[in-house]
Image (tube, rainbow, N blue to C red):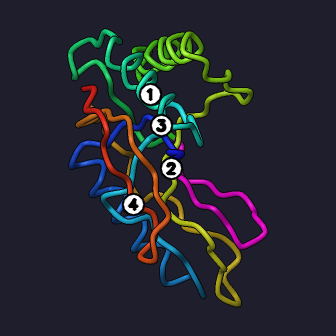
Amino acid sequence: MTHRLFIGAVPGRKQLDELKQYQQTILPCCERASLTKEQNLHLTLRFIGEVEESQTKKIIAAVSALEFKPKEEYFSKIKKYGFFDRRDGLLVYADLEVSDEIYLLVEAMETSLRKVGVKPERRKWLPHITVARRVMLSPGSEKLPQMQQTSSVQPFSDVHLFLSEFTPQGMKYTSLVHLL
């Protein structure tokens, strides 16, 4: 049996509200949009991918051994919203400015995961939260709206090792380990 895993940081309540507000802001200019469910909004710290069950146990042990600083040191601010084109429409994301401690945590996770046989990440890590997928702008809408106000700095509420599953109701993320 395989598991699809990732490590994610859950935004604090105020930032979740800002993300949901932006989702509602873009809806009027969209012909179609698949908004990320509130419970699925997260900053991916490390996508691990498909692993065997025996590997999952090693990953759990490795990430559980990580040392964390106080929760307040892991924070972010939404800089702007952006998008890129995909085959099935636009992917809309919140571009984040994150604390140095988040970058150090990502590096520590990478080192720890390599020790248990997880292949190194090939792409540069870019802090962002996906807010919508499969977005198709309405005829006459040339672009998505930007933020009306500057986002505030917010600590993350939690960090988890998540199991990611495709279900008929959409993606379901289940916490395997609460890390912070």
* Residue type beneath disc 2: Ala
**Residues at badges 2 and 4 in contact (C-beta under 8 Å)?**
no
Viewer-proximal residue, 155 or 168? 168
Tell me, for residue 53, which label it has, or none: 3
* Residue type beneath disc 1: Val
**Would you say the magenta stretch is mainly helix, strand or loop?**
strand
Total number of numbered labels?
Answer: 4
For label 3, count other residues whose C-alpha is less than 10 Å away and answer few (under 14), some (14-19) or many (20+). few
What is the spatial separation of the Cα atoms under label 3 and label 1, in whole angstroms? Answer: 32 Å
Pointer 2 residue: 94
For label 2, count other residues whose C-alpha is less than 10 Å away and answer few (under 14), some (14-19) or many (20+). many
Rendered residue at 61%/23% (across/down):
118
Secondary structure at badge 4 equals strand
Pointer 1 residue: 98
Tag 3 or tag 2, which sits nearer the N-term? 3
What is the spatial separation of the Cα atoms under label 1 and label 2, in whole angstroms? Answer: 12 Å
